[in-house]
Image: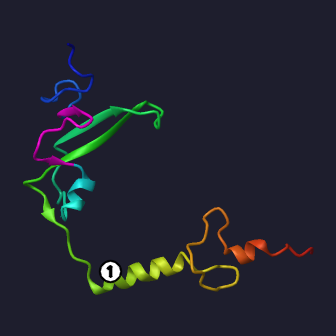
Amino acid sequence: MPAPRYWDPDGARFGIPTYPYRLAPDGLATRRQLRARGLRPGGQPVAAQILWRSRRTRSGVRAAYLYRLDLAKPVRPMTPAKWAALAKALAARRRCPCCRREADYVLPASLGICLICADLPVLAA
């Protein structure tokens, strides 16, 4: 049986250790998996990658970078200033630039204004 297309644990072919989808060894995790454990990469370099075929990209190949769990650091806690900045940014996504009202929803990016302003007929000049 031939070896899988993306099997390169020593990094000779792809430059860094590469594994097929779902075949990465224990002790490595993606950013999302680190975050689920309350960890972050903490400045460490990419330890390996996972490659798989996908129709979503033009090249037909997608990649996920892996980081070592033993070098990962805990996620920094949110400070009161960060919470306040986040609340202000989320409120700005709900404020209509046309009528200056705050909607109960995030304004659609395609319109850039609230739905009430979008439904108003355009006045002839």
98 vs 114, nearest the viewer? 114
Q: Image point 70% across, 80% down: which residue? A: 98
Q: Amino acid at mark 1?
A: Lys
Q: Is residue 120 above or below residue 15?
A: below
Residue 117 position in % (x across, y down)? 74, 77
The answer to which of 15 and 5 lies nearer the viewer is: 5
Q: Is residue 68 above or below residue 119?
A: above
Magenta-drawn stretch contains 20: yes
For mark 1, what is the residue? 82
Residue 50 x %, y % = 25, 37
Q: Secondary structure at mark 1?
A: helix
In the rendered view, would you say 2 is above or below 112? above
| Labels in figure, total | 1
Q: Is 36 on the left or on the right of 120, as rendered?
A: left
Residue at 7%, 54% in the rendered image: 70
**Residue ranking furthest to the left:** 70
Q: Quadrant of the C terminus?
A: bottom right
User: How far from the left and from the top, in percent, is residue 123?
Assistant: 88, 76
What residue is rendered at 85% in x and 73% in y?
121
For residue 65, side relative to residue 110 (left or right): left
Q: How is the image coloured?
A: rainbow
Per the image, is 13 magenta? no
* Residue 109 picture location, percent across and down: 60, 64
Q: Which residues are magenta?
A: 17-29
